[in-house]
Image: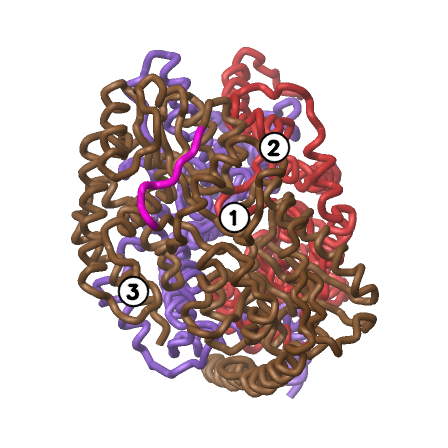
Chain colours: A brown, B red, C purple
Amino acid sequence: MWRRMTVILLALAVVFGLSACGGSKGDSGNSGDSGKGGAAGEAGGTGTTTAAAAGEDAASAGGADRNAKIKIRMMTHYTDEARRNLLNDAIAKFKESWPNAEVVDETTSEYATKEKLEFTSGDGPDFVTVDDLMQQTLNQGHYLKDLTDMVQRNDYIGKSVPGAVEFNNLRTPGKFYSIPTLMAPVVIYYNKDIFQELGVTSPPQSVEELESIMDKAKQAGYTPMANAGQSNMNLMWLAYHLIFNNTNMEDIRQWYYQKSTPDSVKKGFIDAFAKIADWTNKGYLGDPKVMLGVSYDNYISNLYAKGTVAMVMDGDWNIASFMDSGVNTGVFAFPSEYIVNATDSGWALNANADETKTAAFEDFVNIFYTQDMVGKFYTAGYTPSVKFDAANSEAPPLKKELQQAVADKKLGYYLDNAVPGLFDSISRITQELYAGKSTPEQTWDQIQAAYEKGLTK
Amino acid sequence: MKPKINVLGRVPIYLLLLVFSLATLLPLFWVFLTSLKTRKELIKHGPLAWPEAWNWANYHKVWTAGHFSIYFTNSVWIAVVTVAIVLLVVLLASYALSFLNFAGKSFWNYMVVLGLLIPFDLIMIPMFFDMKNFGLLNTRWAVILPQIALSVPFSIFLMRGFMKGTPESLLEAARIDGAGEFRILFSVVTPIVKPAVISLLIFTLISSWNNFMLPTIMISDDKLRTVPLGLNAFRTKYTMDVTLTSAGAVIIALPVIVVYLVFQRRLIDGLIVGAVKQ
Amino acid sequence: MVKGKRAWKRNMIAYAMILPAMLLFIIFVIVPAVQSFVTSLTDWNGIGSAKFVGLANYIDIFSSPESRFYKALQNNLFWLVFGSTLPVVLGLVQANLLVRNRIKYSNVFQMIFFLPQILSVTVACVIWTWIYDPISGPVNEILRLIGLSNLQRSWLGDSHWVMISLLVAYVWLAYGFSTVVFSAAIQGVDTQLYEAATLDGCGKWKQFRNVTMPGIRRTLNTVILLQIIGSFQVFDIVYIMTKGGPGYDSYVLSYYVFSEGLLTSRVGYGSALSIVLSALLFLVSVVYTKLTERTEL
């Protein structure tokens, strides 16, 4: 008898379950709305182009009522203290021209999961910051507003470092869904004292020169290039740079934007991995067994600060840690035309935003394009993608050195952002390469398999 | 007659306990030391060094950076309500499943075991959509109700095990005395399983207090956030400010320790009373 | 018939007692679980539309060459064996020491052993990562200081040691639970039984075997079962300390679920994995319960 009950109950649960999730999966009413919203936005945009002024206080969306009582929900990537303070500054400035606006910042460390969940359930935040992957994901469900006119009207492209504004928007050529203000370059930090001892006076201009420096360091008993193996990011970034150096960027874009996998890309990856395997065998990248046990969170204090490491590849976000390490540190960019550098968290707008919110959004983003705000980010240690004259700013020498090092380098991709979940796979698969457990070809095969699993249908 | 206490024989036992205690405490002590450091000195001197100064700045920062007093209130409210309801519904259900014969009993026992196997990750996403449909999203109940539901299997499982140890004779005696089932539960069985009740109270409290993923997806409003959510605000994509997080961890752990201390005495008192009665 | 009426009343009372718990459980756990099961039959990726694919996900898990299922299962089984025995044994030992020996300050000791349970797993694991750091961590440092440098290892980076290192951290975190539960259980054993045993001339060990163990048998079985289940569901420790690495050496099933479901966004596949994991657990639990029932007198 209880068996029958089980079956009945489960059947009921299935029916209930299906009906409960029917309304939320798949295309919600959003797709219909976004079509309308987008059209209205564009109509409003074209109507005001003639009125648009050239200055920073562009009277955008001229008809918008800045005294309107609106509630704006915001979710951002700005989880660290420095950027949170800057965000609060920006919000305060925003409220000066929008006094009756209520701004609710829902930023949380799990923004990736939450943004997806909330948008899918039809209740996404109004203003969001998105990275390349998130933008790609949200656009699948048409959750973001087309900002092309806003971009043109305010000439964000002209105001930014070349390639920055387009960077995350190249998957939708001609259309813009996010507006970036910061970049996240990966550079090579080096121990100035060791370099002096080795007689190296200027940054390497080619991979061969880099290799010879590593050789000298090895001879002198130092670890030429460190790698926090537990996450393996330093090594991954090194691999990406090698790939940029040996493959045509257009071909890489084909792969990155999920269009196709040219043979040149396959060859580029395999050659890069072969070089890494070679360097590992020569001891240029430390002892894999030891390095694989080093955590990214700790390596600067546990390893680099000991003064035995000549170079390490890391991002601008760790600059403060390097400055605090007690080691006399300098920085240069990898010797290639493109370096790993992406626009970090661009501002995007919910497709359902009405005219007023759209106007508010424009004003809000423009605050981040003022030289004052950009300067604040710069001083806080971040790398703006907005053109900025750093000459008069207060910034530590290492920061200025970094800014100079990346100034004439073109933006290259974090290749692990090509499809969702690829970062986790590449991290593991390259760990096995590093430990000598797989060949460069096998490494490529596994990465490509993971890539294909994550492709958008 | 009081048995002679062999002092010498006890030394190895104390030694063993001391060793265990040290092994347990060292990492914890370290968390505490880390919370007293600044990020700079952590990087410069490494994680093993003694802190430069007894620097309570991190605690101050953690408390004021978010609205920690609000987070605290929310965490307490949610934990207390969760624990209260869990204890009530679990005592009731465990009693029925332990001592009463009723139609469908095996089915429900089977359900309890099944429930132990369902991990939170499996139901996380559909639960979000269900809550939204119920209109409970972004309320405290969106956290409380699932927490109760999720702890039901484990709690019943634990409680049932303890309850079954109750001697039948006591129950028979009570029934002969004319007591109804509810009466028997609360007057006879509950005092006997008091240690289990207190253990359950503490475990449920801790699990609710430290719960991170559930409140994260259910709550967006900063005014409703719980303490672990506030703590995690100091994390970025690649790194974590460990000194701040350590201070936060200590702050989070303190109330639970207090509760544990308070109830631990009751635990012992209750047992002494129980022993005398017998 | 009188019996019928009494049965009805009995059923009513019983259902009144179990309904509150069960209702909540069904609405907030069973229903989403079923919804998840339905999702596992689709290829949903969390954003777009879902297409019904039948058992394709399940077939993929067991037979696809890219499936990491078997590697993860292997690690979980290792965890199962050591992760369900060690904390239980240690908990028993500690509880026995505390309760049966009339230790002064036993409640202080008990609290100390319980502390790891209270601490946030995130922070505890970060600390353990430091402890294991191959260059500056205390383990290797101490080994160096006492002259045993050749015993130094890359605790979290060496394929042979990573699971063991993780297990040690896990046991440290987990034995507080069994200590408290067993303390409560041992305290519940009738002291007269011990007095009788002492009079019979039984030493401490015999008393433990013949009085304590049978007396807490139910609790013992419960705790072991819970540890078994816990060892299959372990996630936090792996996620924070090694992310399943190096390579796939510490990859566990729950990390696989997380990676597929939340990172790669293959929600359908992730749900299928989760269901397989639950089914496995169910199997193990049933086997274990049957075994323990049989040995019970």
Tell me the SS state at disc 1: helix
Describe the element under mark 3 as helix, strand or loop. helix
- Examine the image and state in which quarter residue A179 appears: bottom right
Residue sitting nearer the eye, B216 or B208:
B216
Residue C159 coordinates in the image, percent (x, y): 28, 39
Q: Quadrant of the N terminus of chain B?
A: top right
Residue labelled with disc 1: C219
Residue B193 position in % (x across, y down): 66, 50
Against A351, residue B186 (above or below) is: above
- In front: C125, or C85? C125
Q: Which residue is mark 2?
A: C110
Q: CA distance from mark 2 to mark 1?
A: 18 Å
Residue segment shown in magenta? A330-337
| Helix, strand or loop at mark 2 | helix
Q: Is residue B149 visible?
A: yes
Q: To which residue does mark 3 refer? A: A255
* C239 falls in the magenta region: no
In the rendered structure, which amino acid carries the disc numbered 2? Gln
Residue at the (23%, 27%) spot, across then down: A215
Give coordinates of residue C32: x percent, y percent: 53, 73
Name the front one of labels 2 and 1.
Answer: 2
Dot 2 and dot 3 within a common chain: no
